[in-house]
Amino acid sequence: MTKLFEAPLYPYKRCADQDAGKPVRHPVIIVGAGPVGLAMAIDLAQADIPVVVLDDNDKVSSGSRAICFSKRTLEILDRLGCAEELVNKGVVWNVGKVFFGDRQVYEFNLLPEEGHKHPAFINLQQYYCELYLVERIRALQVAGKPVELRGGNKVVGLDRKTDHAALTVRTMDGDYELEADWLIACDGAGSPTRKMLGLEFEGRIFEDNFLIADVVMKADFPTERWFWFDPPFNRDQSALLHKQPDGVWRIDLQLGWHVDKEEEKKPENVIPRLKDMLGEGVEFDLEWVSVYSFQCCRMEKFRHGRVIFAGDSAHQVSPFGARGANSGFQDIDNLGWKLKLVLSGKAPEALIESYDFERETAADENILQSSRSTDFITPKSEISRIFRDAVLDLSERHAFARPMVNSGRLSVPCTYDGSPLNGPDAQGLPARTRPGSPPVDAPAGRSWLLEGTDGDFTLLGLGIEVPAQSELLGVPLKGLTVAHEDIGPELRARYLGEAEEAVYLIRPDQHVAARWKSLNWEDVTAALSIALGKGGEI
């Protein structure tokens, strides 16, 4: 992967904005060309919202970094037009195994039910994810969509105005000024944007250190997530093994509190640890090594006037559970459609406030789960360790103990209970698809349900005919009718339960907005008004 690391994907080029007589105003500027920033740009560009992405880098990230991409992320990337590339390249997995010492205590399946287009997870190096997202942007540019990707453009100054943000951008040709109606900060955990505004994180800092090693080797380990507590090759600590494409394996080894990070990264110290784990007879090459500690924290608010934070710039969690990058994709999935409607004048600016509520709720859920995972993996007292070890022992033979084992609760999308955008709910329909719920896929006739509910608000009629296209409150409303004979067992169980028919209002991010057991256009109009941030006013 050395060539991929070194090849500029979006090298610096002088742009017309640098020669303008005054700062050029853009509807949306994104700071940061990592996976979250690139996905945000694609989402807006597909809707013909002009967007500029600024990054002081010009190539993919070095090292595999984020590798576990969840089912929900793949569904989002389907809508963005590049999921197929990731799935085709990635390593698909649903099963995880947990070991205590030298024995397996149990295994789990993250997607035991049938009837989903995508698997629970794929493993794919972050540099491939970034590559495919950049290629998607290039395809959109060829198609005439209004998206720019400017490498070698570092934001060094930021001033928040009432109705825009003013930026100073540094390049090899000198500084220039820009303005943005909306600025989206996707510039990572160290977020220079956040620091320029004097904003802080709130939360916990964990003192444990972990070694990440990507190794290239031929091994006959199955395509599963393997997690060890107190393994013989790393006593009193933990270890994690994941398979990636190209014969690359991700290994995480817990190191403890007080370590010299630079020393631990040296090959002469890493290689003996890996040999202890893999065995002397296994040949491997180191591709990438890092030592990290982490925080579970977030900004108090994600929106600050016309500056909005998404991904790691807004919140951070431990790597256990793959909640970092996946929650970042869910951030932009939530924000994109709201920005589109506000910029087009079809929704009030108040709609953006719901991004704060919904994604802060999700961040709190991720931080809670991530903190619990870390406390179980790294007990902070002898009593906690005794409890943990007893749970692990019991889980080998007793099913009741297995839900208490926490090797990282893996990423699932948040349900926005209590959201100001939620409309009415019909009694007796399945709880998993109540208003605020994330999308649940299922076969729908000859296709997948989520394939017919992306991009716009969708009125889903299950056993009830709805018009294929209509318009309410100036907003396009796509209709999707699934006839009685096309409602299979998965769709019935997930959306109908004991009911014979139902109508769902689905948001552009595919979360449920409202649902009924019959079609009444006044009710639909009122629910759409709520989902547009108008508070039900018609």
Image (cartoon, grey):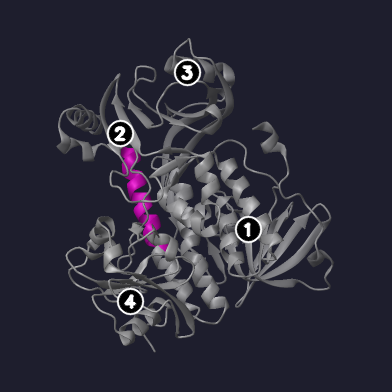
Residue that sits furthest to the front in the current view: 485
Ranked by sequence position, the earlier of labels 4 and 3 is 3
Q: Is residue 325 magenta?
A: no
Look at the numbered disc 2 and give the secondary structure of its residue: loop
Q: Is residue 364 magenta?
A: yes
Q: Residues within 10 Å of mark 1 (few under 14, many from 20)?
A: many
Query: Which amino acid type corresponds to the residue marked 1 in the rendered image?
Result: Val
Look at the numbered disc 3 and give the secondary structure of its residue: helix
- Residue at label 3? 273
- Residue at label 2? 379
Q: Is residue 203 visible?
A: no
Look at the numbered disc 4 and give the secondary structure of its residue: loop
Going by the image, does 90 lie left or right of 12? left
Disc 2 to disc 4: CB gap under 8 Å: no
Going by the image, does 331 lie left or right of 441? right
Quarter of the image where the N terminus is located: top right
Query: Which amino acid type corresponds to the residue marked 3 in the rendered image?
Result: Arg
Question: Residues under labels 1 and 4: Cα distance?
Answer: 44 Å
